[in-house]
Image: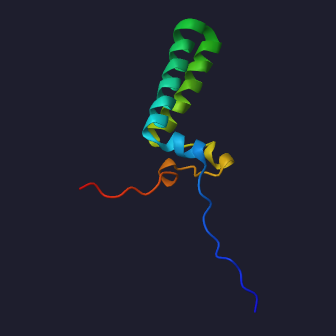
Amino acid sequence: MQRTAPVSEPRPGRFPRLVASKPGRLLRAALGATLVGAGLFAVGGPAGIALAVFGLVPILTGALNLCPLAPLWGGHFFGANSCAARPPKR
């Protein structure tokens, strides 16, 4: 009988853990706010509106703790699944 090693879940890399962390989520929201502001106040016109709408994506993904790009680097689409289990606070 042939023995096989147990299959384990791949550990997420640095990038998925970063974007799932609180600083990563805040960074995405700040980037999105910058894009919205630049689109509405600096660029203007149809291109500015498009940039502002595109800026809503990082704001929403940060607020909802989602990362559409994380599966490309071995992470989970849902950011909470990329975070390590935290011990309960005492």
Q: Is residue 14 left or right of residue 88?
A: right
Residue 59 in picture, x, y percent from top left: 49, 31
Residue 70 in picture, x, y percent from top left: 61, 45
Vertical side of 79 occupied by 37: above or below = above
Residue nearest the viewer, comparing 83 with 64: 83
Vertical side of 3 occupied by 15: above or below = above
Q: Is residue 76 left or right of residue 88?
A: right
When asked about the image quadrant of residue 85, the answer is: bottom left
Pick the quarter of the image with the N terminus. Answer: bottom right
Residue 61 in picture, x, y percent from top left: 51, 38
* Residue 42 in sight here: yes
Vertical side of 41 occupied by 61: above or below = below
Query: What is the residue that sits farthest to the right in this orientation?
Result: 2
Vertical side of 32 occupied by 87: above or below = below
Q: How is the image coloured?
A: rainbow
Could you tell me which residue is drawn at 57 percent across and 49 percent down? 77
* Residue 66 in sight here: no
Could you tell me which residue is drawn at 52 percent across and 25 percent down? 32
Pick the quarter of the image with the C terminus. Answer: bottom left
Residue nearest the viewer, comparing 22 with 42: 22
Could you tell me which residue is drawn at 55 percent across and 32 percent down? 57
